Amino acid sequence: MKVTSVNEETNLDIDPAGSKSLDEVNGSIEVPKGAGFWRTLAAYTGPGVLIAVGYMDPGNWITSIAGGAQYKYSLLAVILISSLIAMLLQAMSSKLGIVTGKDLAQLTREHTSKGMGIFLWVITELAIMATDVAEIIGSAIAIKLLFNIPLIVGIVITTADVLILLLLMKLGFRKIEAIVATLVGVILLVFAYEVLLSNPSISGIMNGYIPSDKIITNHSMLYLSLGIIGATVMPHNLYLGSSVSQTRKIDRSDREGVAKAVKFSTIDSNIQLFIAFIVNSLLLILGAALFFGTDSSLGRFVDLFNALSNHQIVGAIASPMLSMLFAVALLSSGQSSTITGTLSGQIIMEGFIRLKMPLWAQRLLTRLISVTPVLAFAIYYHGDEAKIENLLTFSQVFLSIALPFAVVPLVIFTSSKKLMGEFKNHAWVKYSAWTSTIVLIALNVYLILQTVGVFS
């Protein structure tokens, strides 16, 4: 029987009898009461790391590095704008989960019919598959580059991520946050070191963050800019953010406690997304400092790997160590992203179709759904890396199609007085969110039309 309590001040509907998002870790982490700022922030730090990895996954790498190689530092402004939009949407996503006690998938399902719920689940599941394509391919190629293991075998190995995740879940959600944070740290350090060696232009970097009208007037620059923006905000991160923000134990009948949770979760999210912004900037700066003005092809991960050890391309700093560090960072990115992708798959499956099955079976199913098309493609093309990496282009199309189905409900729900009470979006947040949403949808539609050749 559904028991609903309503907090008079915040007008929040709470359903204690309903299933919780990521039930096994929901509210599992205690937060200190009456503690100082830094101790409280430390308790809330973690979910933002899981969100941030989606903004520095292997799917963004080639686009960012190619942007630097083709247009030097000019597209740093695009990375900055994309990051600001991501911060806005992810803060709203975290707030939604904290205030309502439900994730975006659950709320979307509750406010739609059964048929529409199934339709939205299919669209979102395709988005999860599309997201995982980059992570699986990136991890498998990194394994091949590091250990000379065939690509198909590497793809199969990535399936074992689900077993690692199950083990970590038993050890506590904090362990998952710590592992992912470590992997993010590896990525950050590797590219900071490689950029330092590349001796970039500091004045060029600073000027690059200032938007230029060339981004609009230059067709090829505009297309690459749209690719960077379109690949930045991904649907699964909005579902994930609304769920992992609930891992901290709070009393939703306590208005001050909810406000504090929203505040510190937003700070955590913004800090981690700032780190993702730094990583993406480093990728573009590396492309600009090492590859701008060269004739080298940077269309694939293996091209980048080989270029970093080629003296004719990157000069005196070229070395096998730089290539190996690149592969280590690629593996770290792929592994951290697949962990969060599997969590997102569970959130979406439970939220939309309310599937009840053993945890290990559920996680294995969501992982296999993502791995199967990549593995089938790899077997069909006999492990041809070039053809397999072409899947990345098609994956962005799926993400573009699915994005409005996540962003629009998020803005509607977080702007609702009935659902959010006093925590609904302020006017400036609401209008900024709608503006960002309309721009994102327009850009993604444009990307889709470009992909099918309408504007070619």
Image: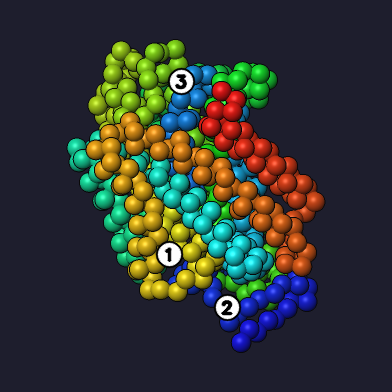
Q: Secondary structure at mark 1?
A: helix
Seen in the picture, residue 389 relative to 108 is either above or below; the reply is above
Q: Secondary structure at mark 3?
A: helix
Residue matched to label 2: 18
Q: Residue at x 32, y 65 (%)?
A: 167
- N-term-proximal mark, 2 vs 1: 2
| Residue 173: numbered disc | 1
Q: Position of residue 126 (x, y in %)?
A: 48, 51
Q: How many angstroms separate mark 3 from mark 2 (CA)?
A: 51 Å
Kind of residue at disc 2? Gly
Nearer to us in this view, 249 or 243: 243
Q: Residue at x 61, y 52 (%)?
A: 405
Image quadrant containing the N terminus: bottom right
Q: Residue at x 47, y 71 (%)?
A: 355
Seen in the picture, residue 29 relative to 433 is either above or below; the reply is below
Residue 55 relative to residue 37: left or right: left
Q: Position of residue 10 (x, y in %)?
A: 75, 70
Residue 400 relative to residue 411: left or right: left
Q: Are marks 1 and 3 in contact (CB under 8 Å)?
A: no
Looking at the rendered image, the disc whose residue lies closer to the viewer, 3 or 2, is: 2
- N-term-proximal mark, 3 vs 2: 2
Residue 317 relative to residue 124: left or right: left
Quarter holding residue 362 = bottom left
Q: Using a 10 Å C-alpha cutoff, classify the residue at mark 1 as few (fewer than 14 neighbours), some (14 to 19) or many (20 or more).
A: many
Image quadrant containing the C terminus: top right
Residue matched to label 3: 69
| Residue furthest to the right | 427
- N-term-proximal mark, 1 vs 3: 3
Q: How many angstroms separate mark 2 from mark 1 (CA)?
A: 22 Å
Kind of residue at disc 1? Phe
Seen in the picture, residue 80 relative to 66 is either above or below; the reply is below
